[in-house]
Image: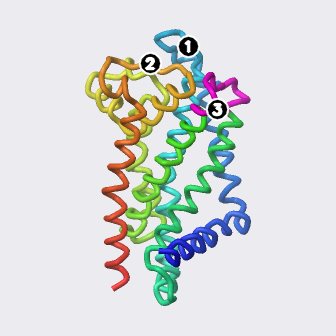
Amino acid sequence: MTQALGDTLLIAGRNLRRVPRIPELAIFAILQSIMFVLLFAFVFGGAIPLPDGGSYREFLMPGIFAQNIAFASVITAIGMTDDLNKGILDRFRSLPMARSAVIAGRTVSDLVYNAGILVVLMASGFVVDWRVHTGIGEFLAGVGLLLLFAFAMAWIGVWLGLNVPTVEVGQQVSFLVVFPITFLSNAFVPPQTLPPLLRTFAEWNPVSALTAATRQLWGNPNPFAAPGFPAEHPIELTIIWTAVLILIFAPLAIRKYQSISR
C-alpha cells in the first residue's frame, strides 16, 4: 500500500510538471474560465430574471464552478488518450511500479489542476460581485463537495480516455457526454423555466445537485421548481451521485487498463 501510494504521487507529480512546461494548458483554461464568467454575468445576466428577484451573478457562480468541475473529465480523457497513443503507458507497465498508480496518479493530478482553476474562478466571481454569505465552515464544505465531484468526473475521464482511439475523438466524446448534463441543469437558468420533462431531468441531474448544494452552503439564490428530495437535500444527493459515479467508473477504468496491460 505504501509503495502504491508513493508511485501514485510520483505519477501525479509527473502529470503536474507538464503545466509549467506547457504553460498554454493553464493559460487557456484560465482564460476560458474567465470568459464564461464574463459572458454569462454581463451578456445573459440581464435577460434571465430569477423567480425571487435575487442576484443573478450570485445565482450564476456556483453553476460556473459546477460546470468547470464537470468538464474535468474532458481534461482527464485527453491526457489518458495522449499517454496511451504515445506509448507512455507501455513504458510505465514495464517499470517495477504499482499498476494502479498510473490511473490513480492521473485522477490525483487532475484534481489538483482543477483546484487551481477553481481558485481563479472564485477570484473572477468575487470581481463580478459574487459573495459567500455564510461562515468559513460552509465555504470549505462547498469547496470540498466540488473537489469530490471533480475526483468522480476524473474517473469517467480515465475510462473514456482508455476507450477512444485518438485525442480528437476523446475530446469530442467527452464534450458529447458533459454538455447535456451541464446545460440541462439549474446551473445557468432556474429550473422553473424549463419544459416539464427537462425540468425533472435538471432537478435530478448530478450537476444540478452539486450547484444547488453549493448555493445552499454559501447562501446564494437557490430556486427550485417544486419541493422534493433534490430541493430539500441537495448536499446528500451530491454525495450519493459522487459515490455512484466512482463505484461505477473506477472499476470500469481499472478493468479496461488491466485488459490493455495483457
Q: Amino acid at mark 1?
A: Gly
Q: Within 10 angstroms of label 2, few (less than 14), some, or many (20 or more) residues?
A: some
Which region is colored magenta?
125-138
Tell which of 129 and 188 is nearer to you. 129
Name the outermost residue toward the left.
Answer: 197
Left or right of 156 on screen, residue 24? right
Q: CA distance from mark 1 to mark 3?
A: 22 Å
Q: Which mark identifies residue 223?
A: 2
Residue occupying the point 50% across, 40% down: 67
Tell which of 70 and 177 is nearer to you. 70
Left or right of 90 on screen, residue 252? left
Q: Secondary structure at mark 1?
A: loop
- Whether pointer 1 and pointer 3 mark residues with C-beta atoms closer than 8 Å, the reply is no
Residue occupying the point 61% across, 50% down: 115
Residue occupying the point 63% across, 72% down: 14
Q: Which residue is mark 1?
A: 54
**Mark 2 or mark 3, earlier in chain:** 3
Tell which of 168 and 59 is nearer to you. 59
Residue occupying the point 55% across, 76% down: 7
- Whether pointer 1 and pointer 2 mark residues with C-beta atoms closer than 8 Å, the reply is yes
For the image, the number of numbered tags is 3
Q: Please tell me in which quadrant of the rendered image residue 225 appears.
A: top left
Q: Which residue is mark 3?
A: 136
Give coordinates of residue 53: x percent, y percent: 53, 9
Give coordinates of residue 243: x percent, y percent: 36, 49
Q: Which mark identifies residue 210?
A: none
In the rendered view, would you say 142 is above or below 17? above
